[in-house]
Image (cartoon, rainbow, N blue to C red):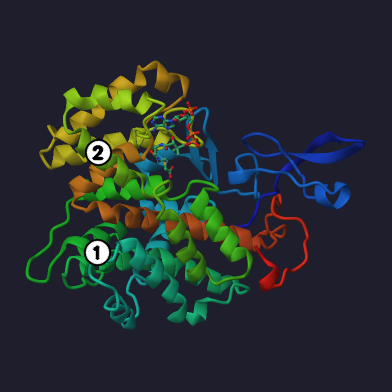
Amino acid sequence: MNTKASGARPNGTATLTYGNKRIELPALKPTEGPDAIDIRKLYGEADIFTYDPGFTSTASCESDITFIDGEAGVLLYRGYPIDQLATESSFLEVCYLLLYGELPTASQLEQFDHTITYHTMVHEQISFLFRGFRRDAHPMAVMVGVVGALSAFYHDSTDITDKRQREIASHRLIAKMPTIAAMAYKYSIGQPFVYPLNHLGYTENFMRMCFAVPCQEYRSNPVLAKALDTIFILHADHEQNASTSTVRLAGSSGANPFACIAAGIACLWGPAHGGANEAALKMLKEIGSIDRVPQYVKRAKDKNDPFRLMGFGHRVYKNYDPRAKVMRDQCYAVLDELGNHNDPLLKTALELERIALQDDYFIEKKLYPNIDFYSGITLSALGFPSDMFTALFALARTVGWVAQWQEMIEDPQQKIGRPRQIYTGARRRDFVPREKRG
Ligand code: CMC
């Protein structure tokens, strides 16, 4: 699969002076983005750790896949800007690009499409696994369980030292995730599972598996399918975010890919990561109408009120999230297609965006709408209940996780992930017998 480029270039040294020690550390220049100081020898040579909770200033790996410039609001997959990919490409083409490093030729895409399509069915025994869950289980709880269980069904692609097996496992994960997500949805609403249909495209197939019923003919709508396909492109990868780092960390021990992706799904489930679009939609519903927008903006600025504008702000983007612009266009397209352009949620969202973007508090703190601001409205208009939103995110992010996992396995610098700590507990002390305590 992808081969690593030449890697970061050496770029002089940095000198760290601490106490009476002077330590020379090599500096590295990436293709894009800030230079990095290579501190790998710091502990061995100087007996010092660095402290960086949340890894806000630490690069954990070299990667050729995705680049983000948060200040400029730029997101590139393999060098291509996200807005160009979202408008001119398809999700499967982007999957190929992320996995193999280059855009496919027409015949490569045809072959890839065929391979993914012919892996979409899941082992029939997996449908019995679903029946072990409560009907009201959250789809993400089901996804974590079922995806983790894939390693029990596909042993022939769990040898991570075999390049071909790694590739097959990657294809299986990308292909089966829509089937599993749709099954989780169908199970939760008490409808029969719908098998994939090979003549349909990836996203149309997924929508059919979610919304078709055996007693009625299902017709796909190309505008809605394009919108969902675009949402998948926008969510396909996002550099070393929490769930991707989780996949890499799990994989660094040599765990099989199905187990690693299940770990990524578990991490994504958290409201600070994958759950924000659900929260943004809930907030817009709570605001309810344009006239109530100012009071919510006021609350968001109040230091004594924990309320935040959901769908605003980002750890990395200190500018308009480039994905949010595309998402907004798709939101309009879907609501127009469905004849909902007067949707009260959209009107509330537009007014909230308008007010917040000219408010000093949001300007000074560089708080702009993020992708989740418009994706909740769009997914809801497409017919998905809000507890499916994160499952859809997991479906789309699977290719990013898989590409990053592959890259990690092939990286000669890769080691088992093992952060250190600053110990702040009790000093060494002797055991006290029970009768002498207190
Ligand atoms: N509404 C009001 N104030 C905010 C908001 C907001 N949405 N976001 C940040 N702030 C304020 C915050 O109170 C703080 O103010 P002060 O400096 O006076 O204490 C300042 O801005 C910096 O906030 P922070 O929490 O230190 O910033 P962060 O980079 O750690 O947090 C964030 C980023 C996304 C967690 C945060 O902006 C937030 O909670 N946003 C709402 C939730 C949301 O939309 N999350 C989705 C993110 S996109 C998902 C993805 O890419 O996968």
Q: Position of residue 197 (x, y in %)?
A: 24, 69
Tell me the element at label 2. Answer: helix
Is the shortest distance between ligand 1 and the CB of mark 2 under 8 Å?
no
Q: What residue type is disc 2 on?
A: Cys
Residue drawn at 41 percent across, 26 percent down: 303
Q: Position of residue 400 (x, y in %)?
A: 48, 54
- In the displayed structure, would residue 70 be above or below residue 219? above
Residue where numbered disc 1 is placed: 185
Residue where numbered disc 2 is placed: 331
Q: Relative to the observer, which residue lies in front, 333 or 428?
A: 428
Q: Is residue 376 left or right of residue 339?
A: right
- In the displayed structure, would residue 342 be above or below residue 96? above
The label on residue 98 is none
Q: Dot 2, how many residues are within 10 Å of its Cα: few (below 14), some (14-19), or many (20+)? A: many
| Residue positioned most to the left | 215
Q: Judge whether residue 100 can be spotted in this image.
A: no
